[in-house]
Image (spheres, helix red, strand yellow):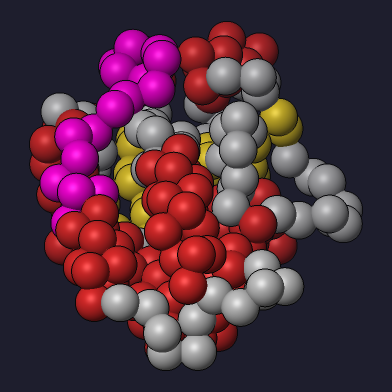
Amino acid sequence: MAGGGQFEVIGFDADDTLWRNEDSFQAAELMFAEIVAPYSPEGIAVLDVLHATEADNIPISGYGVKAFALSMIQAAVTATGGRVPASVIGSLVDHAHQMLMHPVELLDGVPETLSTVGQTNRLVLITKGDLVHQTRKVRTSGLEHHFEHIKVVLDKDVASYRGVLAEWDIDPSTFLMVGNSLRSDILPIVELGGHGVHVPYHTTWEHEVVHDHNGGFAELAQIGDLPTWLADS
């Protein structure tokens, strides 16, 4: 149906769909390895320790910069057997503060795409992570006015999407979700009976990587291709 009229509402992910995010975490990981490794025993892969710590902490602290900072500190202590100096811990904390205050960097074509599809469809934003930080990014992005509803959730799975769509009185069969993560943005919505458009980012956090799936969604090279795809749907 022209103009994406088969979709009552189009949902968008935020991080690495509307603006850059994962790049800053990868830069922080490099910094972590550089300043922590000198204090760890030979043979310890400090980034492996960090990644394992992050995975273990997700059920406790969730997602976002604050959770990542906690994992960096814990991993630094673990990887060095407690020998990491306070100055290194201080540097990790300072870097986390810098990440929290970093300005939003919109991806190419995002404002134009939202303006175009917003003329024919209702738009909502569903993102996960720290409520305070995510809310700050939305408000400072200049994009908030495009969305009828905005929700920050602890995790993005079938149950959370079902709850959000029910709260907003949206039929999943008429809902389209656009995002960069198959695990968080696309597959749960498809399982719920909705529709998905995957727009890959150039890098993906390993926790979000999905190797096996049954498809059932579209994939676009860039978000700017969405209006044309909707018109042809």
Determine whether, in the image, residue 103 is placed left or right of residue 82: left
Q: Is residue 86 left or right of residue 114?
A: left
Image check: 43 left or right of 128?
Answer: right
Closer to the camera, 193 or 142?
142
Q: Main secondary structure of the magenta part?
A: helix
Say which quarter of the image contains residue 184: bottom right
Of residues 211 and 117, the one nearer the viewer is: 211
Let me know if residue 55 appears in the view.
Answer: no
User: At 66% from the left edge and 13% from the top edge, which residue is drawn?
Assistant: 232
Q: Residue at x 84, y 54 (%)?
A: 211
Q: Position of residue 42 (x, y in %)?
A: 67, 73
Residue for point 32% across, 25% down: 106
Q: Is residue 23 visible?
A: yes
Q: Is residue 106 magenta?
A: yes
As drawn, 13 above or below 142:
below
Residue 225, placed above or below residue 51: above
Looking at the image, residue 90 lies above or below residue 170 = below
| Boundaries of the magenta span | 97-116
